[in-house]
Image (cartoon, rainbow, N blue to C red):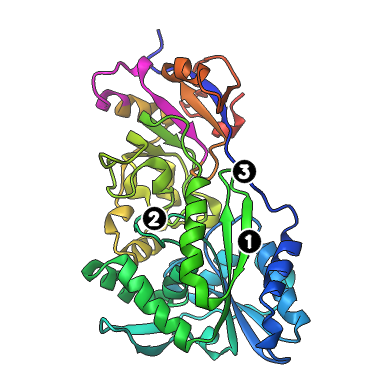
Amino acid sequence: MSDYPRIFRVRQRFEAPQVVDIEAEVEAQLAGLELGQRIKPGQTVAITAGSRGIANIHRILRAAVRHFQKLGASPFLVPAMGSHGGGTAEGQRKVIESYGITEEFCGCPIRASMETVVVCQAAEGFPVHFDKHAFGADHVLVCGRVKPHTGFVGDIESGLMKMMLIGLGKHAGAKIYHRAIIDYNFGQILRSVAREVLTRCRIVAGLAIVENAYDETALIEAVAPAVFEERERQLLLKARAWLPKLPFRIADFLFIDEIGKNISGTGMDTNVVGRKYNDHAAREDEFPKVRRIAVRSLTHETHGNATGLGIAEFCRTRVLEQMDARITRINCLTGGHPTAAMLPLDYASDREILDAALPTIGLTDPPRARLQWIHNTLDVREVECAEAYLDEARGRSDLEILTEPRPLPFDAEGNLPWVKDVS
C-alpha cells in the first residue's frame, strides 16, 4: 500500500457571468457617465494601473484610454500599487508592463513615480498622500477590481476606494494608512481618506471590475464619484458570490503550485484557503479549514515578491531561491503583516514535503489524508483531490469527476508536475 493518498480529478461548476466584448463594454460604461460634460479637449486624465493580475486589464485600460482620446483629452497611466515593485518607480513600471500594460499597447504615456503630494491632514491626524502625477492631472480615473480583501473585513474591502488610499498613496501613503488602520480600523481609515481624496483630487470617475470564479471578467461598471461607497458595497456582494472556492470544506493538506502578487495581495487568496483572520488556522466560523499548506513555486509576474509565503507551513526549496527577500519584506512591513514574509519549512522535493507534513495532520493515516491540489487560488476549476473525498464527490451535482483514483505522479526526483499537466 502506498504511503500517500491516491488522487482523482474533479471539475467544479460555478455561476459564471462573463463580459464578452471587453472594449465595447468599457466604452458603453464610460459613455453612460457623459464625461465630456466635465472633460475639455486638451485636458489630462490620469488612469490608475494596479499590480494585480486582473483578467483583460491591459484591454480594459486601453479601451479607457481610447474613450478619453475620443473626448479630445490626453490620458496617461500611473502605476498605483503602494509598495509593490520593490517600492521603486522603475519596479512598478515593470510590474504593469509584465501584464501587457505598455505605452505601445495602450497608446499613451506611463508616468511612474514614488513621489507624492500631501493634500491635507486626515481627521485622525495623519497626512493624506496622493501620487504626484495624478495630482497634477486635470482629472483622475480610478480603475480597479472589487473583491473581498485578504485581511480586512467590512462592507467595503478591496476596490476603488482602497485604490485611492493604498494605490495612489504610493509607498508613503500605504505605510501611514496601514499604521492608522492598526490604531483605528480599516473601515474608518478607508472612508476618512477616501472622503478627502474625492474632495481634493479631481476624481472624475471609477471603473470597477468584478471577476467570476474562473478568473474571467464578469462585470465592468463605470461609477460616478458621488456613489463610490454605495456601489462598492453592492458590487462586493456580487464579488463574494462569484468568488472561487475549494471543492471541499475540510482539508488535511493543500498543495498550491504557485503564489504571487498577480494572484492575490497575499500571494494566495486567504478567502479561498480559509486563513483571512489567522495565518495558520481558520477561525471557528471560517471555511475552508486547511490544516497544512505547501507552496511549490512563485509566479514569474510576482518578480520575487513572496508576500504570503509565511501563511504556508511548507514549501519547495526553489521558492526560497526565487524569492527576493528585500522586496518581500518591504511589502509585508508596509502592509502591517510581517508574518506574511516569514519562511516555512522548505524541502527539495514534493515527496519530502509530504513525508514531513502528513505525520503532522493528526491520527489520519497518510493514505487516507484529505489532500487537495490546485494550481493557484485564482485557478480552481479543476482540482486534484484525495480518494478520501470520492464518495462525497459522487453525490455532488456541482462536481464532475474526470478520472478514477490513481497514484500521485512523482518523477524520479520525487517531484510532481503542474496540476494542470496531470493526466
| 347 is within the stretch colored magenta | no
Q: Amino acid at mark 3?
A: Ala
Q: Secondary structure at mark 2?
A: loop
Q: Residues within 10 Å of mark 2 (few under 14, many from 20)?
A: many
Q: Quadrant of the C terminus?
A: top right
Query: What amino acid is labelled 1 in the image?
Result: Ile
Q: Say whether marks 2 and 3 touch (CB < 8 Å).
A: no
Q: Are marks 1 and 2 in contact (CB under 8 Å)?
A: no
Lower sequence index among marks 3 and 1: 3
Between discs 1 and 2, the one toward the N terminus: 1
Q: Is residue 61 visible?
A: yes
Over which residues does the magenta segment extend? 358-375
**How many other residues sit within 10 Å of disc 1, few (<14), some (14-19) or many (≥20)?**
many
The image shows a total of numbered marks equal to 3
Camera-nearest residue between 349 and 122? 122
Place of residue 316 in the rendered image (x, y in percent of width and height, measured from the top left): 41, 39
> Could you give the CA–CA distance between mark 1 and mark 2, rounded to whole angstroms?
28 Å
Visible in this render: residue 103? no
Residue 367 belongs to magenta span: yes
Where does residue 51 sit, x and y in percent of width and height? 52, 63
Q: Measured along the vertical axis of the image, is residue 269 above or below residue 291?
A: below
The location of residue 257, given as percent across then percent down, is 49, 39
3 and 1 marks in contact (CB < 8 Å): no
Residue receiving disc 1:
220
Q: Residue furthest top?
A: 1
Q: Residue furthest left?
A: 183
**Disc 3 marks which residue?**
16
The residue nearer to you, when weighing 207 against 277, is: 207
- Counting residues from the start of the chain, the first of labels 2 and 3 encountered is 3
Relative height, residue 104 to residue 129 (above, below): above
- 3D distance between C-alphas at marks 2 and 3: 29 Å
Q: Which mark is residue 307?
A: 2
